[in-house]
Image: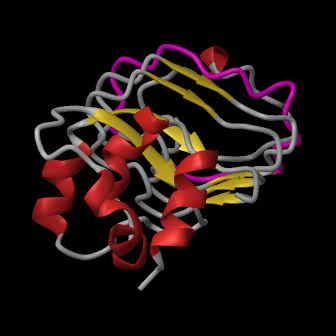
Amino acid sequence: MHTPEFRRHFVEFVPVDALMALRVVTKGWNAAVDALIDEGVESGEMLVHDGKDISFGEANSRKERRKLITRVIFLPNITKVGEYACEFACNLVIVDIPEGIQSISTAAFDGCRSLTTVSFSRTLTSIGELAFYNCPSLENADLLHTNLQDLGNYAFPKLQRNKIGDDPGLTSNAW
């Protein structure tokens, strides 16, 4: 359990509007900030604080909570977007993968049906299978400026190969 002093410092460094969605993160973080979240909030931001699934377990309730997410904020220490990390965030429209993130894991953005734009960082080296599965609104994915070495099967199943800015050196069934 975090102390009130920790909570106060934590809130100073995280934008207040980002606190709306912190209830979806792990139980340890819930204990730190739950009292600071409005119960009436209908949408908000998800703060990813480590490279693991931020609310693994309780699959049905997780799916329902993720429907409320409109934005994802990755803290500077993040190097990996974990498996299923943003799965079912069906109101998520834009994702900015910041510098420092090296991999996007299996099904990380699966079911993000409203996702139209993803900007990828130069540091990205790996995208797992099904990473952007069930993302019908995603029309292109520019990977040319990344250091991508591994592209998992069906990572972008709705996109044609020419819409990804494909590197001829990659061998993948990403489509």
Q: Quadrant of the N terminus?
A: bottom left
Q: Number of marks in the image? A: 0
Q: Residue at x 21, y 43 (%)?
A: 38
- Place of residue 134 in the rendered image (x, y in percent of width and height, measured from the top left): 32, 36
171 left or right, relative to 64: right
The answer to which image quadrant residue 26 occupies is bottom left
Predominant secondary structure, magenta span:
loop
**Foreground of the two, 153 or 121:** 121
Q: Residue at x 67, y 37 (%)?
A: 97
- Place of residue 165 in the rendered image (x, y in percent of width and height, measured from the top left): 74, 20
In this rendering, the answer to whether 56 lies above or below 8 is below
Q: Residue furthest bottom?
A: 1
- Place of residue 83 in the rendered image (x, y in percent of width and height, measured from the top left): 48, 64
In this rendering, the answer to whether 22 lies above or below 73 is below
In this rendering, the answer to whether 38 lies above or below 51 is above
**Foreground of the two, 42 or 148:** 42
Residue 8 part of the magenta segment? no
137 left or right, relative to 171: left
